[in-house]
Amino acid sequence: MPDSLKPTRKSTDRRKRPSKRVLEYLETEYLNRDFPEGTRLPTVRELAARLEVSAPTVHAVVQNLCREGLLSSEGGGGVFLPPRSRRPRQIRIAISHAAPEVIVENPKAMDGFETAWFQRVYGGMLYQAMAEKVSVSMVQLPCRESGAILPETLIDAVDQLDGAIILTSGFGPEVTEAYAAAQKPLISAFPEDDATTSNFVSFNLRPTLERIARAALKAGRRRFLILLRGQLASDQLHRQRLDGIMRGLRLDLHPEMRLVIHEGNGYGQAEGRRAIAEVLEGGFTPDFIYCSGDALALGVAEELSRRGCRIPEDVSLVGGSGFDLTGSPFPTLTRTVQPLEQMGRSLMELLLRRLSLGLKAMPGVYLETPLIGGATTTAEENAGMDLVQRF
């Protein structure tokens, strides 16, 4: 009997379910080996006899693998290995930031919330790769102290990779053009610009922010402040946030209203404290504040409380990350949720689909952004946001 047809010791372990033994045998002896396209597998009866399981069990496993595209069945003509592009294999990719474990080793470079952001996205990517039975090698490229990889570094590495995932905005069209020229898939977390329609995964913030703004407006809020980390001109997600709020406020109907946008480069609590202090000292006293991150919002809350401002009676406060704030002064901060693990899974799924479909462009994916919390907005605002539970 050829070695490739002999059951492995692992697959004949009687303590395992018969279907699991069949699957492990096919994976070990065929799916993960370098057989040429079109290799014919033994018949169901042959496999059942060799593995000492029932023929219906083998048939069920084979049919599942055919539905997943990992095997190919020709009615009455047997089962074959499909083209390599549809078979599990190892791929080499880079992401636009150092792997989370590298960032954690340099705590001064990144805020804890930022580190958690990358860890959760990264974990989702690995989860999806495991679910699709693809071995993914993350190529570690040289990076800045902050963990960010330079655009030119990503371009220089294109020949080493099967593809890349961009986790932050602002990398510019040069990277996209370089990967397109090399016929390597490039997937972005967030569209590169407002005209981008494909090869990205983003949060659908517009309807959520519109709902928040309408609820605040209905509750009598008139002086709105938006605190952003980064600049509107370079961050498509910020522009999406602003668009949602503007839709909810309908500024043309309320000429007495004021909207102030504060742009900055910080994302931690210290930056939140400094930002709100600058706004207040500049003569603007908001009664509603939206922050693009939870850490910013916590800093704002601390400074407002220090100045004797009551939350939410005097001013409502909404954060924008959705992290676990247990142990913070405001654990029930009203905030939008960024489904980070789902983003990681969707990024990896999109990249793998492009590889399997010959690099065909795929439509962009928008993920829902729900709301949690409720203690830093009033009961009336919570009801308007369909966030009726108070913690």
Image (cartoon, rainbow, N blue to C red):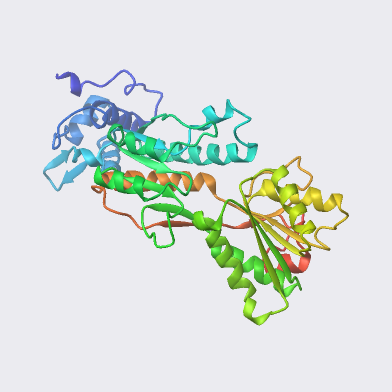
- The answer to whether 312 appears left or right of 336 in the picture is right
Q: Quadrant of residue 289?
A: bottom right
**How far across and down, in percent of the image, does residue 51 sit?**
26, 26
- The answer to whether 314 appears left or right of 271 in the picture is right
Determine the residue located farthest toward the front in the rendered image: 282
Pick the front one: 210 or 332: 210
Q: In which quarter of the image is residue 76?
A: top left
Determine the residue positioned at 27% across, 36% down.
Answer: 58
**How far across and down, in percent of the image, does residue 53 sit?**
29, 30
Name above or below for residue 347 compared with residue 316: above
User: Does the image show residue 68?
Assistant: no
Q: Quadrant of residue 256?
A: bottom right
Q: How many labels does the image show?
A: 0
Name above or below for residue 105 compared with residue 304: above
Quadrant containing the C terminus in the rendered view: bottom right
Name above or below for residue 99 compared with residue 272: above
Name above or below for residue 271 compared with residue 287: above
- The answer to whether 352 appears left or right of 225 in the picture is left
